[in-house]
Image: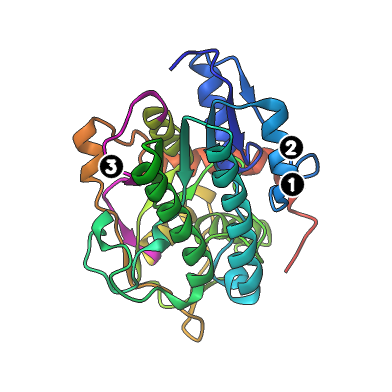
Amino acid sequence: MNKNTKIYIAGHRGMVGSAIWRLLELKGYTNLLGKGSKELDLRSQSAVEEFFEHEKPEVVIDAAARVGGILANNDFPYQFLMENLQIQNNLIDTAVKTDVKKFIFLGSSCIYPKFANQPLKEDYLLTDTLEPTNEWYAIAKIAGVKACQSIRKQFGKDYVSLMPTNLYGVNDNFDLKSSHVLPAMIRKFHEAKLDGNTPVTLWGTGTPLREFLFVDDLANATLFALENILPEHLYNVGTGEDLTINDLARIIQKVTGHTGKIIWDTSKPDGTPRKLMDISRMHALGWKHQVELKDGIESTYEWFLKNEGLYKQVKY
């Protein structure tokens, strides 16, 4: 990959896209292209086509999506389905039409069936029903995976899909109405500490098992896919290790310095009982994660403290 290749990173201001941008700059890539949502509405086919015709990107990395946790997925199912379909379909179809040679599509482990065998292999896609609380987002992402697979099959283009496990890190979303479990816990424990170590109430039983990947590790996996021609169309990206939500809460509680009680609200849903990724495909090619969970949480909390002003005015 030439360091002057024009690379368009869709969603470059989000947690994932910004991590990829930082890494590519660090590695000497000098022709990176990004547009914010106010400059380019990826839901508009005509806007995307006009942008591609003008800028002529050679590589596209799709890190753009409408994302959120269980609450957001449950409250806005239509938007999570339709907006994600619009964003990725416009990017993928326009990339094909303008002869973009390489396309990296980023998705989520929620594409796999709720009760699939563990760890989750890429071959388990479409073998059973999805987790109801995030099926709208999952269906959109599955469509993106199959679109890239069909392009490889029909046109022989280097379009590949990377499915990361649960992500967290710098530039994460800490809004309690739309965030995922790990950043939500960081904010809850932090604010409870400031309020005199008051109890923290968390959803569910604490028993589900989850795997977490620091966003910089996904950026490294994306760089790996960028600089190599991967033989398969779909790859899981994760650590290959999981822990209970209760254990996660204890780690975050310790990192934030909260010393109060943890209360589990068992009237709220747990979601999928376990989601552990089989990452043997990526390991076989030579990629492996580098950041361990506690280190990543400490880095994320440090970033949160520096940017707390973005969130402390909003109480729920």
Looking at the image, do the residues carrying marks 1 and 2 touch, with CB atoms under 8 Å apart? yes
35 to the left or right of 81: right
Task: Please give the range of residues in magenta.
Answer: 226-245
User: Depth check: 244 or 158 in front?
Assistant: 158
Q: How is the image coloured?
A: rainbow
Q: Tell me the CA gap for discs 2 and 3.
A: 31 Å
Q: Residue furthest bottom?
A: 267
> Which residue has dot 1 on it?
46
40 is higher (above) or lower (below) than 67:
above
Q: Secondary structure at mark 1?
A: helix
Vertical comparison of 57 with 139: above or below: above
The residue identified by callout 2 is 50
Which residue does the image show at 29% across and 54% down from the upper left?
277
Could you tell me residue 267's position as x and y percent? 50, 86
Q: Which mark is residue 232?
A: 3
Mark 3 to mark 1 CA distance (whole Å)? 31 Å
- Front of the two marks 3 and 1: 1
